[in-house]
Image (tube, grey):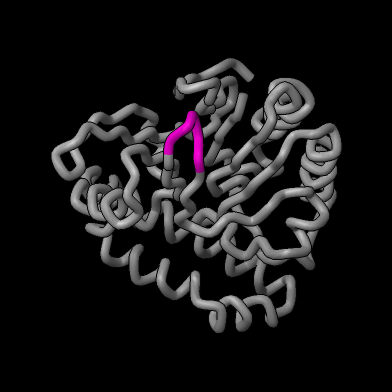
């Protein structure tokens, strides 16, 4: 069995979700051969050099799960794009490119966080291009920790305000972008998160049936996962 999750947005202000994830790492994740996290594991990450008690606890739990035999993989989201090699080494997570093509259930599958598909949100796409630029990231990481913490808080606030004023369809994926990416990577299955709209979408790519799985975000009392067993992919929610 293989598991995929996304959008936990872990933060000390949401202890119920953090506890649910720790229980998940100590339980279901250890029964799986692999656990893949498709971004936004944390609500914010200002650099591998800053780790409070909360971040250290999550890293230790990931490492313990990895040491138990579960292969862990992590892909950057729009909230934790500054996670780096030090985090990967200390947590036992392999870093995945976005997008990444893997084999699941005997088929080629493209994995991505999902924000790159929201092409109608032009303001966000401009920010995404900047945020994924290594030079910009280096500039941010050179700032004192206090300034980075303040910047992270400001970006979270601005994001919330901006999303409140955006039309729902703008914040969802662009259908044409989905098909183009699947064509480019020659796949008929796509898995992503980001939109917080869990669903299984049937579509057509080059005249053939295809499927897009959207992972849900974790909330107090509820988690989401995609479970892969043999040739079956199942999107499911569960109590935490």
Q: Which residues are magenta?
A: 103-107
Residue drawn at the location 70% of the way across and 34% of the way down: 18
Q: Nearer the viewer, residue 213 or 156?
A: 213
On screen, residue 61 above or below 231: below
Asked if the magenta segment contains residue 61, the reply would be: no
Instruction: Examine the residues drawn in magenta and state their main secondary structure.
Output: strand
Identify the image quadrant of the N terminus: top right
Count of numbered labels shown in the rendering: 0
Query: Which residue extends farthest left?
Result: 207
Q: Position of residue 189 (x, y in %)?
A: 36, 37
Residue drawn at the location 73% of the way across and 78% of the way down: 144
Asked if the magenta segment contains residue 104, the reply would be: yes
Q: Is 44 on the left or on the right of 226, as rendered?
A: right
Q: Position of residue 42 (x, y in %)?
A: 63, 48
Q: Position of residue 16 (x, y in %)?
A: 68, 28
On screen, residue 151 above or below 177: below
On screen, residue 198 above or below 167: above
Q: Nearer the viewer, residue 52 or 224?
A: 224
On screen, residue 7 above or below 199: below
Identify the image quadrant of the C terminus: top right
Residue drawn at the location 24% of the way across and 29% of the way down: 202
Residue drawn at the location 77% of the way across and 41% of the way down: 62
Q: Position of residue 164 (x, y in %)?
A: 33, 48
Quadrant hosting residue 63: top right
Q: Nearer the viewer, residue 33 or 131?
A: 33
Query: Which residue extends farthest front?
Result: 106
Q: Is 97 on the left or on the right of 235, as rendered?
A: right
Q: Nearer the viewer, residue 182 or 208?
A: 208
């Amino acid at each position: 069995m293989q598991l995929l999750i996304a959008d936990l947005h872990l933060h000390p202000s949401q202890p119920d979700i953090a506890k649910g994830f720790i229980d998940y790492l100590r339980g279901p994740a250890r029964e799986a051969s692999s656990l893949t996290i498709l971004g936004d594991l944390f609500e914010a990450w200002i650099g591998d050099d800053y780790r409070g008690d909360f971040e250290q606890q999550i890293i230790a739990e990931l490492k313990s799960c990895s040491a138990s035999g579960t292969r862990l993989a992590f892909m950057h989201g729009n909230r934790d794009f500054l996670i780096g090699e030090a985090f990967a080494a200390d947590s036992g997570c392999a870093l995945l490119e976005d997008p990444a093509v893997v084999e699941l259930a005997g088929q080629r599958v493209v994995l991505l966080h999902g924000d790159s598909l929201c092409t109608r949100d032009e303001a966000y796409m401009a920010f995404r291009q900047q945020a994924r630029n290594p030079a910009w990231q280096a500039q941010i990481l050179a700032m004192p920790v206090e300034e980075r913490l303040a910047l992270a808080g400001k970006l979270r606030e601005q994001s919330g305000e901006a999303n409140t004023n955006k039309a729902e369809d703008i914040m969802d994926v662009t259908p044409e972008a989905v098909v183009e990416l699947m064509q480019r990577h020659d796949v008929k299955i796509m898995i992503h998160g980001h939109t917080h709209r869990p669903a299984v979408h049937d579509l057509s790519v080059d005249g053939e049936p295809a499927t897009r799985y959207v992972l849900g975000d974790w909330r107090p009392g509820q988690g989401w996962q995609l479970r892969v067993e043999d040739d079956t992919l199942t999107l499911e929610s569960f109590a935490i």
